[in-house]
Image (cartoon, helix red, strand yellow):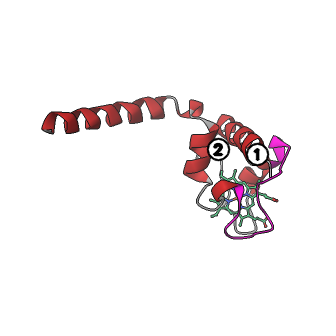
Amino acid sequence: MKTSVLCIIAALTSTIAVGSALAAQKSGEALFKEKCATCHPNGGNIMNQKKQLKGIKVPKTIVAKIRTGGGGMPVFDRTSVSDADARAIAGYVVKTFKK
Ligand code: HEC
């Protein structure tokens, strides 16, 4: 029992280490869940029903909104979301929330 708990802890620790070393390579899905899903669960918008992410077709629009924020959405600068991460998130949003 004790050993298996330790194994789990060891596995988690190494995942975290690898995760931060390769931060730019996290999937768009993982990044979206981490940074956006609190306000945009399933591509919706808990703060403003009219500003959902569903149906957005141009990834650039999403990247721009990440950088400028506004209307209640925080600005994410390059220290919190790198350019590569912003593109990964945008790609995920466009292909996942079609309607
Ligand atoms: C604290 C809540 C919050 C978080 C976190 C948040 N957003 Fe938003 N988002 C909003 C609000 C509120 C709006 C409406 C803004 C407006 O009226 O311009 C919005 C609008 C948007 C829009 C424009 C939608 C439209 O139909 O015009 C996009 C795209 C978007 N968010 C993407 C993201 C992405 C990608 C992330 C994660 C990096 C994110 N948001 C994180 C609250 C949030």
Q: Residue under label 1, please give it.
A: 63
Q: Is residue 11 magenta?
A: no
Query: Horizontally, is 21 left or right of 63 in the view?
Result: left
Q: Residue under label 2, please give it.
A: 78
Q: Main secondary structure of the magenta part?
A: loop
Q: Whole-percent x and y of residue 84?
A: 67, 34
In the rendered image of this protein, does residue 11 appear above or below residue 56?
above
How far apart are the two marked residues, 1 and 2, measured between alpha carbons? 11 Å
The quarter of the rendering in which ligand 1 is drawn is bottom right
Dot placed on the residue nearer the N-terminal end, 1 or 2: 1
Determine the image quadrant of residue 3. top left
The residue at label 1 has a CB less than 8 Å from ligand 1? no
Picture residue at 56% right of the left edge, 34% below the top: 26
Q: Quadrant of the N terminus?
A: top left
Query: Horizontally, is 12 left or right of 30 in the view?
Result: left
In the rendered image of this protein, does residue 27 appear above or below residue 96?
above
- Report if the CB atoms under discs 1 and 2 are less than 8 Å apart: no
